[in-house]
């Protein structure tokens, strides 16, 4: 039997939402063992002078407890 836990993280990028997701999962994988999935719960952009300057995602990361 496996027990999973879900934790919420926020990740940002200046390039894209995809980059923010990839960076967030890579960072979560350094701290958490057995990461199995991620759900993007929310996305937003930062705008300065009418241009997008940042992308942010809020994700729920699922990992299996040992």
Image: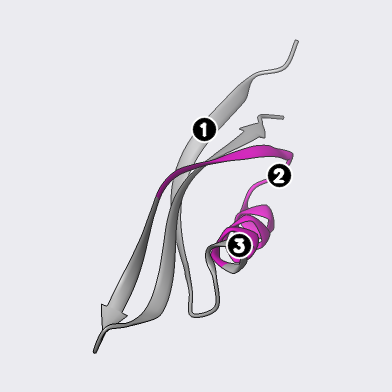
Q: Give the residue number, with chain letter if any, for mark 2.
A: 33
Give the quarter of the image for residue 45: bottom left
Residue 1 shown left or right of residue 10 in the figure = right
Q: Residue furthest bottom?
A: 49
Spatial CA span between label 3 and label 1: 21 Å
* 27, 20: nearer the viewer: 20
| Viewer-nearest residue: 31 or 18 | 18
User: Which of marks 2 and 3 precedes in the sequence?
Assistant: 3
Q: Which residues are magenta?
A: 20-42
Of the residues tagged 3 and 2, which is closer to the observer? 3
SS assignment at label 2: loop
Residue 29, position as x, y percentages in the image = 68, 54
Q: Is residue 41 above or below residue 19?
A: above
Residue at horizontal 44 percent and vertical 56 percent from the top: 57
10 Å neighbourhood of mark 1: few (<14), some, or many (≥20)?
Answer: some
Decide which of 31, 8 is in the foreground and name it. 8
- Percent from the top left, x then y, of residue 2? 72, 17
Residue 35: x percent and y percent?
Answer: 69, 41
Identify the residue position indicated by label 3 in the image. 18
Q: Nearer the viewer, mark 3 or mark 1?
A: 3
Which residue is outermost to the top?
Answer: 1
* Residue appearing at x 74%, y 39% in the figure: 34
Q: Choose top left, top right, bottom left or bottom right for residue 26.
A: bottom right
Q: Is residue 41 above or below residue 4?
A: below
Helix, strand or loop at label 1? It is: strand
List the residue tagged with mark 1: 6
């Amino acid at each position: 039997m496996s027990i999973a836990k879900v934790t919420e993280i926020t990740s940002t990028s200046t390039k894209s939402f995809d980059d923010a997701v990839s960076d967030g999962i890579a960072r979560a994988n350094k701290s958490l063992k057995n990461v199995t999935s991620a759900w993007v719960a929310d996305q937003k952009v930062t705008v300065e002078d009418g241009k997008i300057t940042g992308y942010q995602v809020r994700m729920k990361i699922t990992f299996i407890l040992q």
